[in-house]
Image (cartoon, grey):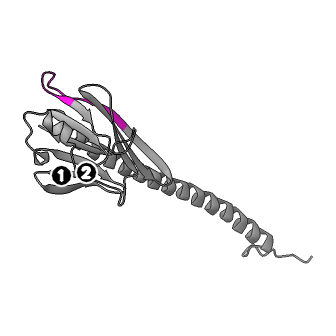
Amino acid sequence: MISKTINNKGITLIELVIVIAVLSIVMSSAYLVFSFGLKTFQDGTSRVDAQSKARIIATNIEKQTSRAMVVVLSNDSDNVCSDILENLNEVDSKDDFNLIYFDESNGKVYLEENSSKTEIASNISSLSFDKKGNRRFEYLIEVEYDDKYYQLSSEVTLLDPRFSKVEIVDTEENSDDFNVLWYHR
């Protein structure tokens, strides 16, 4: 009798191809999960950045204006209308006003106090103000991120009912969109 010896020390080509195919499927799935997680993280980071910029602007608006005696909504960051100044006993000149405004040319929001200009936020799409009542105004902040927009709007009521008021100076005929907020405390 002749005995046959079977060699079990190697793998066949078919087994190798099957292992490579299974590993390719597993690695592709792992890559898809990783890339989805990375994209989700990047989207979340962009959204948080946009929300943070909007919150910083909103906090400044509310902090600066809640105790204001007069708020003037305008499109002009250089001049407060002389008609407004004439009607205000406690205000001598435009230098008594501070302002928060949006510069469309560079997408930045600025705070000017006591002749000092401070950048509040950059890469802003828009900031607008609208009068809602004698002592109330609304603001809308829009920040673009990853071809999407995050909007934040709120209404501010001036606290002192005896003296405070909101005025509008329309430097552009019949404009509903004001991007400068003058205020006097």
Closest to the camera, between mark 2 and mark 1, is 2
Q: Quadrant of residue 19?
A: bottom right
What kind of residue is marked 1? Glu
Count residues near mark 2 (Cα–Cα under 10 Å), then give few for <14, some for 14-19, many for 20+: some
Count residues near mark 1 (Cα–Cα under 10 Å), then give few for <14, some for 14-19, many for 20+: some
The quarter of the image holding the N terminus is bottom right
Mark nearer the N terminus (2 vs 1): 2
The quarter of the image holding the C terminus is top left
Q: Label 1: state its secondary structure.
A: strand
User: Which is more toward the observer, 51 or 99?
Assistant: 99
Residue at image x 56%, y 55%? 33
Q: Is residue 2 left or right of residue 9?
A: right
Residue at the farthest right position: 1
Is 38 within the magenta?
no
User: Which is more toward the observer, 94 or 55?
Assistant: 94
Q: Which residue is mark 2?
A: 77
Q: Residue 139 appears at what percent x and percent y?
A: 33, 37
Q: Label 2: state its secondary structure.
A: loop
Q: Residue 121 appears at what percent x and percent y?
A: 29, 54
Residue at image x 36%, y 55%? 104
Residue at image x 10%, y 45%? 93
In the rendered structure, are the residues bearing label 2 and label 1 in contact, judged by CB atoms less than 8 Å apart? yes
In this rendering, does residue 64 appear at all? no
Q: Which residue is mark 1?
A: 112
Q: Which residues are magenta?
A: 153-165
Which of the labelled discs sits on residue 40, or is there none?
none
